[in-house]
Image (tube, rainbow, N blue to C red):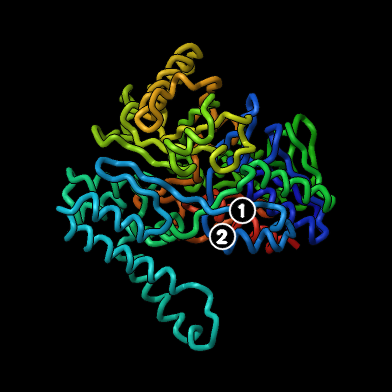
């Protein structure tokens, strides 16, 4: 059996650790934070629970299968996550894509013809994706190659098209349906994956009723029960190599030998900062890594409210709400717009509406979240701590102000508040610029040529990428896929 060092205890690190420990390998996970989980972690403040980053996940068949393989599925209370959308004349709870299509037609009847054309094209993308489900009989197996060819034709058709560009094919750019639909994804997401995104978000979106941290905790405890070692507060100083092969890691000044190293963490920092011999990365690849853009980060406000659950439910109706007043359109690429957070879409999530035990009795919790421009206002103050504090407070007040349109007089209920910026997320997850989902989702800015493939191998022998960074668009399923592939490579 082999000795394996894993950098990071996010979903990729925890899954790889469990699967390797099951096979009898000697595995140590090194985590710089005080708790496991990475972006799939959470925290408590004054009796209120909040998610640190990730709220939900998709690709449940993959996720649930791996949890079954590890033997922890029954210990994690997975539950479906749905959304309510508030925009201009639109206000609807959405439990399927059909619900959203119906609501859009009712809200914008003058756009019926354009909406029907748009819906027909997206529906065809969805049908193509559904056809790729695992064949259940010989006839489906025979037809599978033809279905795959059809999907690939559709993928190539929009391979270099962004969602805003795709949406503009059906609507005027100053129309309300355009402004709504272009924002239903990461900024400039590839339109080629729109069908998969729609199916994921509206038909296969899940969360954990007891909070994401409980999921990470179950995996961490199971890993330790299998004989694995989880070292918290143990940031990696460097990855040790010898003759072009990874042979261990150094943490807190101490070296740890390993036959294999899995970096279940940021790709850029793995090779630009942690690798002891930078010459192992070819210059061309190194420059590509340095220049490759990452996915957008978030700014999040955490509120503990002296507001009964009944009133919170009256205002939000369901735990997950997307809101925009449609008065102005924020430009996420304008890092110098000091009023950005007064205009941006906001996502509201109440953990206590999902589970009343996640807040004190008679009270409720609320997260207000929006994507943030890269390095907003000179990277949040240019290193000046007082400037950073002022900008953070400005963003927080703006997001609370926006949310007051959904929860009137919100400020008067606040008894606890805290905020996280991209700098916060980078500090705790070590993701470059606080990236929320690995590399950029823009098809014109891809790092991997094979957009949907999982890439775990690196220029260094026995060093693998076992996190969401092994995929162009990351996410929990991406991290789990990478972890499984790493396990397959280790003998």
Q: Nearer the viewer, mark 2 or mark 1?
A: 1
Residue at the extreme front of the image, as rendered:
310
Give me the residue at 74% from left, 35% from top.
Answer: 232
Residue 159: x and y in percent read 34, 60
Mark 1 lies on residue: 78
Disc 2: which residue? 60
Query: In the image, is 302 to the left or to the right of 102?
Result: right
Residue 40 is drawn in which quadrant?
top right
Q: Which mark is residue 153?
A: none
Q: Position of residue 279 (x, y in %)?
A: 59, 43
- Asked if labels 1 and 2 touch by Cβ distance under 8 angstroms, the answer is yes
Name the image quarter holding the N terminus. Answer: bottom right
Sort mark 1 into few (<14), some (14-19) or many (20+) by Cα contacts within 10 Å.
some
Left or right relative to 438: residue 464: right
**Side of 6 relative to 295 (left or right):** right
**Front-lying residue, 291 or 389:** 389
Q: Residue at x 77, y 50 (%)?
A: 223
- At 78% from the left and 46% from the top, the residue drawn is 221
Of the 4 image quadrants, the one containing the C terminus is bottom right
> Mark 2 and mark 1: span between their CA atoms?
10 Å
Residue drawn 33% across the image and 42% down it:
86
From the viewer's side, name the closer residue of 135 and 434.
135
Neighbours of disc 2 within 10 Å: few (<14), some (14-19), many (20+) = some
The residue closer to the viewer here, 212 or 460, is 212
């Amino acid at each position: 059996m082999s000795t394996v060092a894993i950098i990071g205890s996010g979903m990729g690190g925890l899954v790889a650790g469990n699967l390797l420990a099951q096979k009898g390998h000697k595995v140590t996970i090194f985590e710089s934070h005080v708790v496991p989980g990475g972006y799939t972690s959470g925290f408590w403040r004054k009796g209120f629970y909040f998610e640190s980053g990730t709220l939900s996940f998709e690709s449940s068949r993959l996720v649930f299968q791996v949890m079954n393989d590890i033997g922890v599925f029954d210990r994690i209370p997975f539950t479906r996550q749905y959304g309510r959308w508030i925009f201009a004349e639109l206000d609807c709870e959405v439990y399927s894509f059909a619900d959203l299509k119906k609501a859009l037609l009712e809200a914008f009847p003058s756009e019926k013809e354009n909406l029907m054309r748009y819906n027909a094209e997206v529906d065809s993308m969805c049908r193509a994706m559904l056809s790729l489900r695992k064949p259940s009989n010989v006839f489906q197996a025979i037809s599978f190659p033809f279905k795959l060819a059809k999907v690939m034709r559709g993928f190539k058709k929009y391979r270099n098209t962004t969602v805003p560009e795709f949406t503009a094919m059906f609507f005027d750019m100053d129309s309300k349906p355009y402004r709504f639909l272009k924002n239903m994804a990461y900024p400039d997401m590839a339109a080629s994956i729109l069908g998969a995104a729609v199916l994921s978000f509206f038909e296969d979106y899940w969360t954990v009723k007891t909070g994401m941290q409980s999921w990470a905790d179950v995996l961490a405890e199971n890993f330790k029960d299998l004989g694995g070692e989880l070292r918290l507060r143990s940031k990696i100083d460097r990855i040790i190599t010898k003759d072009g092969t990874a042979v261990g890691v150094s943490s807190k000044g101490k070296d740890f030998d390993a036959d294999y190293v899995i970096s279940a963490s940021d790709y850029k920092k793995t090779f630009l900062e942690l690798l002891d011999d930078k010459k192992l990365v070819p210059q061309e690849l190194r420059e590509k890594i340095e220049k490759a853009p990452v996915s957008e980060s978030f700014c999040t406000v955490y509120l503990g409210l002296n507001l009964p659950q009944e009133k919170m439910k009256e205002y939000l109706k369901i735990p997950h709400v997307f809101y925009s007043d449609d008065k102005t359109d924020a430009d996420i690429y304008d890092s110098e717009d000091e009023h950005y957070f007064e205009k941006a879409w906001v996502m509201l999530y109440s953990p206590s509406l999902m589970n009343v035990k996640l807040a004190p009795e008679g009270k409720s919790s609320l997260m207000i979240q929006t994507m943030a421009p890269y390095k907003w206002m000179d990277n949040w103050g240019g290193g000046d701590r007082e400037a950073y504090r002022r900008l953070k407070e400005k963003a927080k007040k703006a997001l609370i102000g926006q949310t007051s349109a959904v929860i009137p007089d919100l400020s008067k209920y606040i008894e606890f508040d805290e905020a996280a910026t991209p700098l916060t997320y980078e500090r705790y997850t070590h993701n470059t610029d606080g990236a929320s989902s690995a590399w950029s989702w823009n098809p014109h800015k891809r790092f991997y040529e094979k957009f949907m493939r999982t890439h775990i191998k690196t220029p260094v022998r026995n060093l693998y990428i076992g996190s969401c960074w092994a995929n162009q668009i990351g996410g929990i399923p991406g991290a789990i896929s990478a972890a499984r592939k790493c396990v397959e490579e280790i003998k």
